[in-house]
Image (cartoon, grey):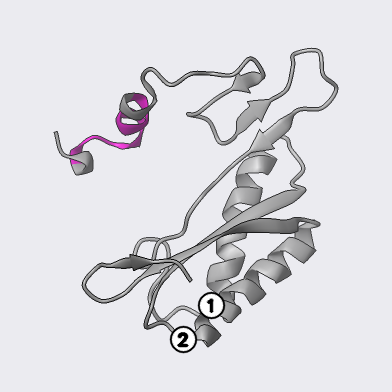
Amino acid sequence: MKLAGMGEDALVAALLRGLPAGRDVICGPGDDCAVLGTRRAKTWRLLKTDCVIETVHFLPEEEPQKIGWKALARTISDIAAMAGRPEHALITLAMRGDDELKRATGIYEGLKKCAKAYGVAIVGGETAGRVAGGRAFEF
């Protein structure tokens, strides 16, 4: 079966079969966020990851700052949908090796503005990329 014909729910169900769940998982994959904690706890942790993909979520000519804002705002929105308050974010940035540094720093300007507007601390993440021909590299 090809992924394109499955739909997101069927794909997620197939990927999650047999995955172990921790004792502190109140709500695992399949909702806006994972919910961690104990049923008696006064606060729970919400975990969320999201991505924005060029030509799917934004056009190649989009202003980098808007891309960065959107990338973080999508996750903040999902946390809000679960009645949560965002505090920390991890950022994964994957770009082509022939992209300009100005584009990457522009994306981070948008991330920083969104983080400041919503009181979120960017605490780490990952960078990766690929060069022509598909060879992957890390910065």
Q: Categorize mark 1 by other alpha carbons within 10 Å: few (<14), some (14-19), many (20+).
A: some
Q: Amino acid at mark 1?
A: Ala
Q: Is residue 35 above or below residue 74?
A: above
- Residue 69, image x and y in percent? 61, 66
Q: Residue at x 38, y 17 (%)?
A: 18
- 4 in magenta: no
Q: Nearer the viewer, residue 83 or 14?
A: 14
Q: Amino acid at mark 2?
A: Glu
- 9 in magenta: yes
| Left or right, 111 with reference to 132 | right
Asked which quadrant contains residue 53, the reply is: bottom left
Q: Is residue 8 above or below residue 100?
A: above
- Residue 80, image x and y in percent? 69, 42
- Tag 2's secondary structure? loop
Q: How many marks?
A: 2
Q: Nearer the viewer, residue 129 or 77?
A: 129
Q: Is residue 119 above or below residue 129?
A: above
Q: Residue at x 45, y 65 (%)?
A: 128
Q: Residue at x 21, y 44 (%)?
A: 4
Q: Residue at x 67, y 52 (%)?
A: 89
Asked which quadrant contains residue 41, the reply is: top right
Q: Which residue is mark 2?
A: 100
| Left or right, 101 with reference to 2 | right
- Residue 48, image x and y in percent? 59, 42
Magenta segment, which residues?
Answer: 5-13
Q: CA distance from mark 2 to mark 1?
A: 7 Å
Could you tell me which quadrant the N terminus lies in? top left
- Tag 1's secondary structure? helix
Q: Nearer the viewer, residue 138 or 76?
A: 138
Q: Which residue is mark 1?
A: 104
